[in-house]
Amino acid sequence: MLKTVELRYGRGILNVNLPEGAEPMMIRKTAMTKLPDAAAAVRQALAQPVAAPSLKELAKGRKSACIVICDITRPVPNHLFLRPMIATMTEAGIPRERITILVANGLHRCRDDGELAELVNDPWVLERVRIVNHDARDSSSLVDLGVTPTRGTPVHINRLLVEADLRIVTGLVEPHFMAGWSGGRKVVAPGVAGEQTIRTFHSTRFMSNPLATGCNLAGNPLHEEQLEITKMIGELYGLNTVIDEERDLTAVTFGEVEASHLGIISACRESFLVRSPRRFHTILTSAAGYPLDKTYYQTVKGMVTPIDILEPGGTIIIVSACSTGFGSDEYRKAQQELISLGADAFFEMLQTRKLAEIDEWQTEKQLAPMRLGKIQLYSTGLNAAEQLLTGVEPIESVDEAVAQALANSPDNALAVIPEGPYVIPVFDAST
């Protein structure tokens, strides 16, 4: 029987000692096969796309290109594909000075030079191509494309992407607790969308929809709006990657934005969905380590993803380094409102708003695990005041918290999820 378990924490591993008699069940992604030659796999994807000509053919005759990359909260292997993409474009005749890398910050803060260097992770690219931070609040940098046909979401998208001759979005495909899956269309919206667009489809009418959940695209209102937005932009291509627990590449696709995204999801879906034959009174999880656990804002994802296997009244113990602190000022305000109003009154207030306040959607998503059970947080990156703002119970020792939770449980069963939100546990009594 395991006596110690390892959880991703910051840039390293947190070892947790289990009490005598604990019966842990490890819940992690199904082992994925590493690509033996990642660089060759990227070249093949660019040469043999899904539902599109090769990148070399696509780039011929184009006068400009925009490559959108995720912000620093996602461990996307940009160093593997940016250089061959740019080299292919320039060889096909696109002037290097007319190629722009656009960082999909959404409503997150813009990144400084040091963070951009870490994000791109290739000095060759940094020296040769212009890199621009998307700023959702800068209306002068946006193009108004009207409203989506189904739900009337106002569509404001970064001008650099909309007006480029060749448009490519890149990203990491992993479970997402609202949009079903990250990558593809999500890199456009919210990635390079304007504030009004993001605040509209992050409002309660979307967030409270039971189909807006992890690994689900069918009927998911966020996914459907994102697809409509990509169609309003026009010709758009996507490069999608999948990585394993060691952050090594296991899959890569390139092609038409929707087809390439759905194709890679189909190939990796069962690796991320883990079926459990039971629910647990005690769950030990993480916020997936760096870079996702840089802030408490992102930590909420790790609280939400395991709730399908949490027994009502049970305990979720989550570890998150929060190395850069709490999150935005707007998020702090939302958390303060949650604490002062209480969960029910806070949710009622949200329902009166047509537009969500910035970052309060994360507070709204925290309501689900709070209503189901108790949440305990271990973090070395939050000060005392920030610990209070979390709305959950801070702990100083994970070992002691696990021992106490099991002592209060009717059994010694413990679910352990080393990578937190990168895994979606699903209760399935038939397994």
Image: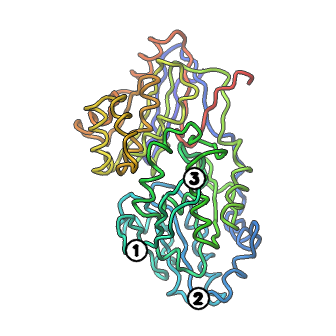
Above or below, 167 against 21 in this view is below
Give me the disc on residue 326.
none
Q: Nearer the viewer, residue 253 or 193?
A: 193
**Within the image, what quadrant is residue 382 found in?**
top left
**Within the image, what quadrant is residue 226 found in?**
bottom right
Give the amino acid type for the residue marked by disc 1 in the picture. Ser
The residue that disc 1 covers is: 141
Give me the disc on residue 63.
2
Quadrant placement of the N terminus:
top right
Callout 3: helix, strand or loop?
loop
Q: Are marks 3 and 1 in contact (CB under 8 Å)?
A: no
Q: What residue do we see at 68% from left, 30% from top?
A: 275
Q: What residue do we see at 56% from left, 67% from top?
A: 79
Q: Badge 3: few (under 14), some or many (20 or more) residues near its Cα, within 10 Å?
A: many
Q: Badge 1: few (under 14), some or many (20 or more) residues near its Cα, within 10 Å?
A: some
Compute the Cα span from label 2 to label 3: 30 Å
The residue that disc 3 covers is: 182
Q: Nearer the viewer, residue 329 or 320?
A: 329
Q: Nearer the viewer, residue 289 or 370?
A: 370
Callout 1: helix, strand or loop?
helix
> In the image, which is nearer the foreground, mark 3 or mark 1?
1
Q: Position of residue 422 (x, y in %)?
A: 56, 43
